[in-house]
Amino acid sequence: MTAKISYADVEVGTELPAQTFPATRATLVQYAGASGDFNPIHWNERFAKEVGLPDVIAHGMFTMAEAIRVVTDWAGDPGAVVEYGVRFTRPVVVPDDDKGAVIEVSGKVAAKLDDNTVRVDLVATSAGQKVLGASRAVVRLA
Amino acid sequence: MALDQSFVGRTYPPTEPYEVGREKIREFAEAVGDANPAYTDTEAARALGHPDVIAPPTFVFAITFKAAGQVVADPQLGLDYSRVVHGDQKFAYNRPVRAGDRLTVTSTIETIRTMAGNDILDIRGEVHDQDGEHVVTAWTKLVARAAEEA
């Protein structure tokens, strides 16, 4: 595994480049097919509202997949991720229009650990509200 | 209804092997819009030290969650799946999942709690390859929301 970032070059507080990830209804249908998660709350507005949601919501695992890209794009090698965990605190609501929702993700080095690993704390928001809690990754740097 | 605490520590039989296909990895990477060449280009993956293309970090969830279905659908446990939401998810990797892996998952119920009428279930999935090597462990917290008052 070959991260392009050197352990020696980062400090606690180092910020990773923030990214924004769009999610339209089409994105969710594509993710449903790729992941095999066909729960209708992710594509059927009538069903979503029947179970008390404001509208169709993104798969939590879709948001989790996008958030780690801030780490993997920074490190270069996705195989350098040693640990990754999130809490699904709030759904990403995806309206039926051309813009859909936008997930904004930022990350910061929170601790330098053993064996050239660092802990990165991630913040993911959509429509101004946090959608993931306790979102952390441990990544092995060069 | 509170779940039976005697299920804590119960381990279910390993799943049949799931063979990780390179085109399935590509399909997943495209679905999340991730153009990292390590997912689609064998040479790029090798340049990073991997024997073949690797899967994005959360790819394995599709496999571990299907395995957790054994637990969720266990009639003796009696979880009401229509009320289940995904609370937390965590992965600890020994190595990335890669094309050609034949992965089995062994699911264990780690904890069962009841909070404010919600049943909270922690399931650990241990993922091994065809050589018995540990690849990744997935922890999934499921919350079965309390039934509404009739």
Image: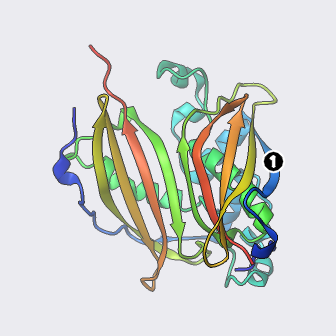
Q: Is residue B107 left or right of residue A126?
A: left
Residue A5 vs A14, above or below: the answer is: below
Tell me the quarter of the image containing the N terminus of chain A. bottom right
User: How many discs mark residues in the rendered view?
Assistant: 1
Indicate the quadrant where residue B41 lies: bottom right
Q: Which residue is mark 1?
A: A19
Indicate the chain on which mark 1 is placed: A
Q: In this image, B38 relative to A132: left or right? A: right
Say above or below: A113 vs B35.
below
Q: Nearer the viewer, residue A74 or A43?
A: A74
Residue A121 in the image: above or below residue A99: below
Classify residue B99 by image quadrant: bottom right
Question: Residue A83 or B148: which is nearer the viewer?
Answer: A83
Q: Residue at x 64, y 45 (%)?
A: A63
Q: How is the image coloured?
A: rainbow
SS of the residue under disc 1: strand
Report whether residue B110 is seen.
yes
Q: Amino acid at mark 1?
A: Gln
Query: Where does the image place residue B59, in percent across and percent down from the top left?
Result: 59, 60
| Residue B136 point in image, percent of width and height | 50, 70
Residue drawn at point x = 34 percent, y = 62 percent: B107
At x 70% / y 68%, what residue is drawn? A78
For the question of whether residue A69 can be seen, the reply is no
Residue located farthest toward the front when viewing the structure as drawn: A12
Q: Which residue is at 38% across, 60% downward?
A: B124
Between residue A17 and residue B144, name the one nearer to us: A17
Relative placement, left or right, of A120 versus B1 is right
Left-right relation of B46 to A83 = right
Image quarter of the C terminus of chain A: bottom right
